[in-house]
Image (cartoon, grey):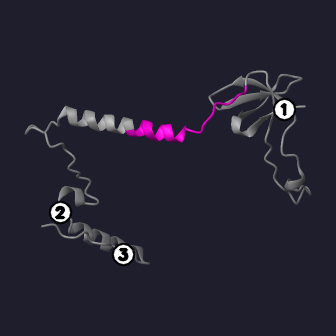
């Protein structure tokens, strides 16, 4: 018969808490394997194991397939509303400026510009990252995420 899992109350004194925790762990020796909280002995072997200790290969294959299927389902839901960006090399864009107020320099962030001067997309580094360059000199200004960009329209 299984005993109930002991609850450990958090005390204000750390030593009391540690001693109570260790005392509660001594009572977990005779529990079934899955009810032992800190012994890390999980009896997850499949039902079709032979006596040699080797698990059935089909059990783990099925478990892996189920994990892959669950992962693809979550990815499909997550990416349902995602649309690819439309920026290409040579496009003129502006990027968002993160303005910070400064009392010492007498700067108020809410009165500053929120977008930069026009820059050119020099290179697409990753699926969502681009390098931005100065249109006159061609010098790389910064790396930016596409969520921080918008097309520059006159």
On the image, the x and y values in percent for residue 149 come to 76, 36
111 or 63: which is nearer to us? 63
On the image, the x and y values in percent for residue 95 come to 79, 37
Residue at label 3? 9
State the quadrant of the N terminus: bottom left
Q: Is residue 55 above or below residue 7?
A: above
Disc marking residue 31:
2
Query: Is residue 78 one of those drawn in magenta?
Result: yes
> Of the residues under marks 2 and 3, which one precedes in the sequence?
3
18 or 68: which is nearer to us? 68
Give the left or right position of residue 87, taking residue 94 as reference: left
On the image, the x and y values in percent for residue 2 come to 16, 66
Q: Is residue 115 above or below residue 39?
A: above
Residue at label 1? 152
Query: Is residue 131 one of those drawn in magenta?
Result: no
The CA distance from mark 2 to mark 1 is 67 Å
The CA distance from mark 1 to mark 3 is 60 Å
Figure quadrant of residue 69: top left
State the quadrant of the C terminus: top right
Crowd rating for badge 1 (residues with CA inside 10 Å; few <14, some 14–19, many 20+): some
Please tell me which residue is depicted at 53% across the width and 41% down the height of the picture.
78
Callout in the foreground (1, 3): 1
Q: Which residues are magenta?
A: 70-87
Per the image, label 1 sits on a secondary structure element best described as: loop
72 or 45: which is nearer to us? 72
Crowd rating for badge 2 (residues with CA inside 10 Å; few <14, some 14–19, many 20+): some
């Amino acid at each position: 018969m299984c005993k109930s899992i002991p609850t450990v109350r958090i005390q204000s004194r750390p030593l009391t808490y540690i001693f109570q925790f260790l005392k509660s762990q001594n009572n977990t020796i005779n529990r079934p394997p899955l009810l032992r909280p800190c012994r890390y002995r999980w009896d997850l072997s499949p039902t079709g194991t032979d006596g040699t200790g080797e698990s059935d290969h089909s059990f783990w294959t099925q478990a892996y397939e189920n994990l892959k299927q669950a992962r693809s389902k979550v990815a499909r839901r997550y990416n349902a509303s995602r649309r690819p960006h439309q920026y290409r090399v040579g496009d003129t864009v502006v990027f968002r400026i993160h303005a910070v107020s400064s009392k010492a320099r007498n700067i108020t962030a809410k009165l500053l510009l929120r977008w930069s001067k026009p820059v050119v997309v020099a290179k697409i580094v990753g699926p969502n990252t681009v390098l931005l360059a100065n249109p006159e000199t061609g010098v790389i200004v910064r790396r930016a995420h596409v969520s921080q960009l918008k097309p520059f329209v006159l």
